[in-house]
Image (cartoon, rainbow, N blue to C red):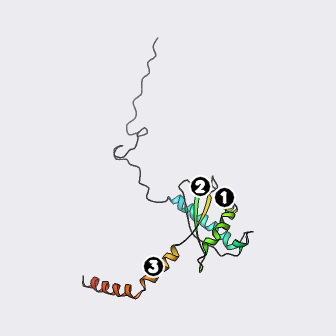
Amino acid sequence: MRLVVRQLPRPAGRRRDRVLRDGDGSGLKKPARTGPSQRQLRVAEEIRHVLAGIFARNEFRDPELAAAQVTVTEVRITPDLKNAIAFIARLGRSDVDALLPALKRATPYLRGQVARVLRLRFATDLTFQPDTALDYAMKIEELMHRPEVARDLEGLDSKIDTV
């Protein structure tokens, strides 16, 4: 006795088993990743708010951090939401590098506070880096106001007006 197995015909229009490859899949392509997703941006902004609140309230046992006025300028997070980099600055001061060892010691506490507030599946690992964007912007501003640059820009304005 032989057992015969017949396959039923598939309904038209279903693409369940199709493999999407570049140039294959009858015009179906995966969208190209161009930047962070909305979820990444939202979670990163929430982490920034939580860290900024902790730094504003000075909830630290470490005397180095208790006396420091730290501003969290940006947080970038990985797509799996497990690692985050917080960029910090001290307004009016450029000695952020001196705070990095103290922040590294306080990272477990900060991680616990962030995990308690955000309620994600995993507690996000935090690393801190100094934010040099403000220093760079001030340097560019200073360069733009130098006399030789202003002279070159005046000549450029007259060329643009004639065109």
Name the image quarter holding residue 143. bottom left
- The relative height of residue 89 versus residue 106 in the rendered view (above or below) is below
Q: Which residue is mark 1?
A: 115
Residue type, numbered disc 2:
Lys
Residue at 67%, 75% in the rendered image: 68
> Most extreme residue toward the right, as rendered?
61
- The relative height of residue 100 versus residue 144 in the rendered view (above or below) is above
Disc 3 to disc 1: CB gap under 8 Å: no
Could you tell which of marks 1 and 2 lies nearer the N-terminus?
2
Crowd rating for badge 3 (residues with CA inside 10 Å; few <14, some 14–19, many 20+)? few
Mark 2: which secondary structure?
loop
Mark 3: which secondary structure?
helix
> Most extreme residue toward the left, as rendered?
163
Disc 3 to disc 2: CB gap under 8 Å: no
What's the distance in space between the residues labelled 1 and 2, CA to CA? Answer: 11 Å
Q: Which residue is mark 3?
A: 140
Task: Choose between 82 and 28: the one closer to the eye.
Answer: 82
Q: Is residue 142 left or right of residue 56?
A: left
Residue at 37%, 86% in the rendered image: 148
What's the distance in space between the residues labelled 3 and 1, CA to CA? Answer: 38 Å
Crowd rating for badge 1 (residues with CA inside 10 Å; few <14, some 14–19, many 20+)? some
What's the distance in space between the residues labelled 3 and 2, CA to CA? Answer: 35 Å
Crowd rating for badge 2 (residues with CA inside 10 Å; few <14, some 14–19, many 20+)? some
Please state which of the two labelled residues, at mark 3 or mark 2, is closer to the viewer. 3
Q: Which residue is mark 2?
A: 82
Q: Quadrant of the C terminus?
A: bottom left
- The relative height of residue 56 versus residue 157 in the rendered view (above or below) is above
